[in-house]
Image (cartoon, helix red, strand yellow):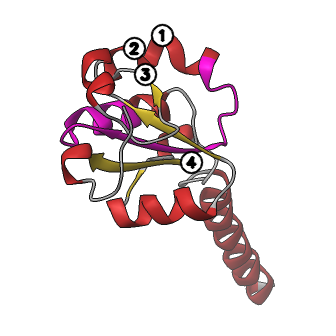
């Protein structure tokens, strides 16, 4: 009888611990755990050259964009991301590459995209560090 009670207690403790980790903890599908990835300009260029399905977001102003931008980039200034992203970027699982002039606004834009539920955001800094071609 004592052995049975001991095993029962061990079983209850084990189930309690399993229940806490199975029901709580950090689930990878919770929005709070999704973040953007910071990559280098070289890594971004490799993605642009090899991946067909990617979107490039230029988070600068219209006048900065007109001075020169990465070919294929879509202009969505960081202060307009919250208002425009869901309409212009309907696929929240799409591979999105984000840059600005120096990297500050691209980080803000990337954080905002993540808050909106985008799951595959990669931020690669500023065009001032972009050693590849640009277009006007």
Distance of label 1 from label 4 (alpha carbons): 19 Å
Mark 4 — residue? 120
Mark 1 — residue? 83
Where's residue 63, x and y in %?
A: 26, 17
Identify the image quadrant of residue 8: bottom right
Distance of label 3 from label 2 (alpha carbons): 6 Å
Where's residue 55, x and y in %?
A: 57, 40
Mark 2 — residue? 80
Mark 3 — residue? 76
Marks 1 & 4, CB-CB < 8 Å contact: no
Q: Residue at point 70% right, 33% down?
A: 91
What's drawn in magenta, residue-wise? 88-111
Distance of label 1 from label 2 (alpha carbons): 5 Å
Label 3: how many Cα within 10 Å (few below 14, some 14–19, many 20+)? many
Q: Secondary structure at mark 4?
A: loop
Left or right of 67 on screen, residue 80: right
Q: Is residue 13 above or below residue 54?
A: below
Q: Residue at point 26% right, 27% down?
A: 67
Return the residue nearer the eye: 70 or 90: 70
Of callouts 3 and 1, which one flags the residue occurring earlier in the amino acid sequence? 3
Q: Residue at point 54% right, 55% down?
A: 25
């Amino acid at each position: 009888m004592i052995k049975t009670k001991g095993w029962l207690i061990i079983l209850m403790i084990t189930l309690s611990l399993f229940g806490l980790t199975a029901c709580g903890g950090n689930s990878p599908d919770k929005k709070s755990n999704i973040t953007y990835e910071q990559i280098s300009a070289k890594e971004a260029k490799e993605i642009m050259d090899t991946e067909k399905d990617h979107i490039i977001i230029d988070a600068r102003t219209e006048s900065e964009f007109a001075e020169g931008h990465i070919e294929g980039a879509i202009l969505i200034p960081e202060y307009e991301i919250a208002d425009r992203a869901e309409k212009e970027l309907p696929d929240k699982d799409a591979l999105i590459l984000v840059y600005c002039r120096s990297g500050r606004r691209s980080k803000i834009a990337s954080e905002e995209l993540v808050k909106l539920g985008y799951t595959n955001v990669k931020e690669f800094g500023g065009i001032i560090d972009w050693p590849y071609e640009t277009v006007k």
